[in-house]
Amino acid sequence: MRRFLLVCSLLAAAITAPAQLTFVFDYTYDTGSFFSGGNIGNRTYLEAAGTYLSNYISGTTLNAITPGGGNSWNADTFHPGTGDNQVLGNISIAANTILVFAGGYDLGGSTLGVGGGGGYGVTGTQPWLDAISYRGNGSFSMPWGGSIAFDSSGTSWHFDSDTSTTETFTGQSDFFSVAVHELMHLVGVGTNATWDSLISGTSPTSTFTGAASVAENGGVILLDPGEGHWVNGTMSTIAGTATPQETLMDPSIVIGTRKYLTDLDLAALQDLGYTVTAVPEPATIAALFGLAAMLSVIRRRRTS
């Protein structure tokens, strides 16, 4: 069986996404046209993946980031069309939103997708620094946003208008699975300071000690050597069900298959300070698609 290791719209007025926290996708830096030009339809699949994830963390609130007076900042992230560093400047972020710059380029080797939260430099008061770092969530690091990018060369993508089904797509990589995986990295899983604070030991035997994750797993969870994923092969159950599945946030996915968020993946979000809804509002993703007509490869492909 071939495996792949994972490395770090059209809305009708009648449909209202139930999530309070939302991803706002920005394609300004999609210089490779992965989501633009003839590929503009790919935006629908990415935004639906964002809705799927945001429905699980809909109860989370994030304060706005509004520079002014002597308080300013420079947000930065990787350019999703080239991989280079991109300085965004003194931008404003609305409350309860996470800004996602999306694109694609030739990631090289076996990489299907990359994603992560952005950085920043701050000038101003301590409360202003805290406002950017935590967005009103105590000591939990919360993102202003970041970037995700997908391989635009050498990967045969499967784009699916109904991700509730798992029909055969032999030889293709599931965009939905990769997109949700990379968005999970962007919101902090495997990447932010809170995650790092919950790691015990040293690689390759380090473990994750977040209370919710330990309770869900029945003990500490062994991490992948890079400490940004559960160790390969970690099992859980599809969120809100009794159906076993390899976790979305371990570093691999079998080509031609789909992964959903699992209860252990959601527990990690809870440990990072998110308010998690175990069973989100039903079928939003299917409704969006109905009106409108998402990992690195080593023969295992890996995400980051």
Image: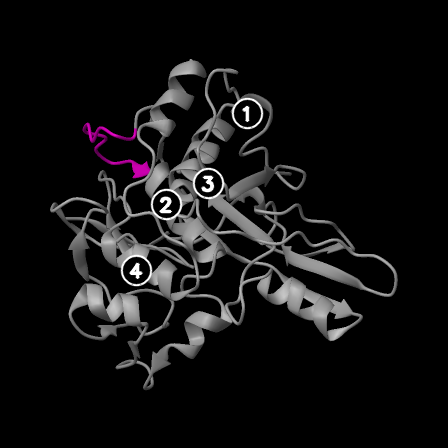
Would you say the magenta stretch is mainly helix, strand or loop?
loop
SS at mark 1? loop
Tag count in the figure?
4
Q: Are marks 1 and 2 in contact (CB under 8 Å)?
A: no
Camera-nearest residue between 50 and 79: 50
Is residue 292 shown left or right of residue 215?
right
Using the image, tell me which numbered label, if any, was put on residue 153: 3
Q: CA distance from mark 4 to mark 2?
A: 11 Å
Q: Amino acid at mark 2?
A: Tyr
How far across and down, in percent of the image, does residue 179 sit? 41, 43
Q: Is residue 286 left or right of residue 48?
A: left
Q: Which residue is mark 2?
A: 56
Q: Which residue does the numbered mark 4 point to in the structure image?
A: 267
Residue 275 x %, y %:
41, 54
Classify mark 1: residues with Cα within 10 Å, few (<14), some (14-19) or many (20+).
Answer: few
Magenta-tinted stretch: 163-174
